[in-house]
Amino acid sequence: MENNETESKQEIKKSNKVLKVIGKICNVIIWALIIIILALLLITVASKRTDILGYRLYLIMSGSMEPTIKTNDAIITQKIDDPQEGDVIAFENGNMITVHRIVQVYTEGDNKMYQTKGDNNNAVDQGLVQRTQVKGKVIARLPGVGQVIRFLQSHFIILILAIGIILIVLLVRRLI
């Protein structure tokens, strides 16, 4: 009877160890998935100009707004109905998005148009920006984040492999 009890306790200990190992493996897999999903979300939001609750993320590719906004920064814009003189806005410019400051507002009846200029440019932009072209007002600058996002976009497979290797090493260290 005592021998059966001892064997039963040993089996329970073994199954507990197996469950702990499985739990650690699941924990590592969950963290890996969270990191990968966050990286994919960041890349998708930046590359598709996705609007989330009226906010958008853009990557700055030129120095036309320096020193206010620098090349390789990311910006967050908020949808706005009535931009004002002095606001820095993102607007459609052909098939591109431009981020410049409103230097003058013109009103024709109910229609407003905006003269824009990059802070680092000597002259105002050609043509006026229509209200329908305005995507949003810049509400935040994220220094250097654009460079990180572009790196992630171009090296995503390497990032996934590096995360996998790191997680495997951490898992092995925990199990030993």
Image (cartoon, helix red, strand yellow):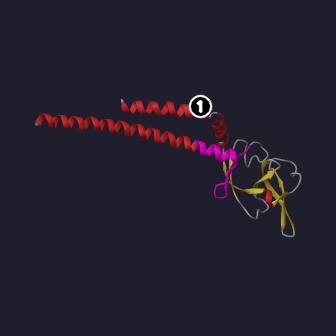
Q: Quadrant of the N terminus?
A: top left
Q: Residue 86, position in %: x, y?
A: 78, 59
Where residue 55 sits, quadrant-wise, is: bottom right
Taking 30 as reference, is 152 left or right? right
Q: Residue at x 50, y 30 (%)?
A: 165
Taking 168 as reference, is 23 left or right? left
As rendered, which of 79 and 21 lies closer to the eye? 21
Where residue 42 sits, quadrant-wise, is: top right
What residue would you read off at disc 1? 158
As rendered, which of 18 and 57 lies closer to the eye? 18
Furthest-left residue in this view = 1
As rendered, which of 43 and 87 lies closer to the eye? 43
Q: Residue at x 44, y 38 (%)?
A: 28
Taking 164 as reference, is 71 left or right? right
Q: Quadrant of the C terminus?
A: top left
Answer whether residue 59 is magenta in the image: yes
Task: Provide the residue span drawn in magenta.
Answer: 39-60
